[in-house]
Image (spheres, rainbow, N blue to C red):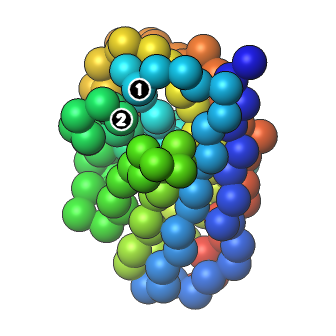
Amino acid sequence: EVQLVESGGGLVQAGGSLRLSCAASGVTFDDYQIQWFRQAPGKEREGVACISVNDDDTYYADSVKGRFTIASDKAKNTVDLYLNDLKPEDTAVYYCGLDFAGVCESYIDSSYDVEPDYWGQGTQVTVSL
């Protein structure tokens, strides 16, 4: 059974950085994508970044492009999301997702209305002024 566990959230001042990790277990082959989503109170869930683990192809939402970086560690079955130059509007619960043989853009661009099959429990990121 596929399981995802996020870690690394916390409280940081604006302009600061955090690293979130998504540890995947129960995955037996490497043709899958890991996505990061976030949901702020009263707002819809937003796709933030995605990586195809087999070729490290990445895709980012415009709102985080240039500030966030997604990277995989195949040996550890983890995907990290590096959050830099954080802003108060980045405050949200961040979730990682996993799906097999998809296309990263389809998870991040809401017009595709595609969701992963597996979800983590979420980790809170709070950015203060």
**Quadrant containing the N terminus in the rendered view:** top right
Image side of residue 21 versus residue 122, left or right: left
Residue 58 location (% of width, % of height): 26, 41
> Which mark lies nearer to you, 1 or 2?
1
80, 63: nearer the viewer? 80
**Quadrant containing the C terminus in the rendered view:** bottom right
Residue type, label 1: Asp
Determine whether 8 is above or below 52 in the image: below
- Disc 1 or 2, which lies upstream in sequence? 1
- The crowding category of the residue bearing disc 1, from other C-alpha atoms within 10 Å (few below 14, some 14 to 19, many at least 20), is some
Image side of residue 30 versus residue 11, left or right: left
Q: Secondary structure at mark 2?
A: loop
Tell me which residue sits at (30%, 19%) in the image: 103
The dot on residue 30 is 1
Residue 31 location (% of width, % of height): 37, 21
Determine whether 101 is above or below 124 in the image: above
23, 41: nearer the viewer? 23
Residue type, label 2: Val
Tell me the residue that label 2 is attached to: 53
Tell me which residue sits at (43%, 65%) in the image: 82
Residue 54 location (% of width, % of height): 30, 31
Residue 26 found in image quarter: top right
Determine whether 118 is above or below 75 in the image: above
Asked whether the beta carbons under mark 1 and mark 2 sit within 8 Å of each other, the answer is yes
Say how many tags the image has.
2
Q: Can residue 42 be seen at all in this image of the molecule?
A: no
Q: Can residue 22 be seen at all in this image of the molecule?
A: yes
Residue 106 location (% of width, % of height): 33, 19
- The crowding category of the residue bearing disc 2, from other C-alpha atoms within 10 Å (few below 14, some 14 to 19, many at least 20), is many
CA separation, marks 1 and 2?
Answer: 6 Å
33, 26: nearer the viewer? 26
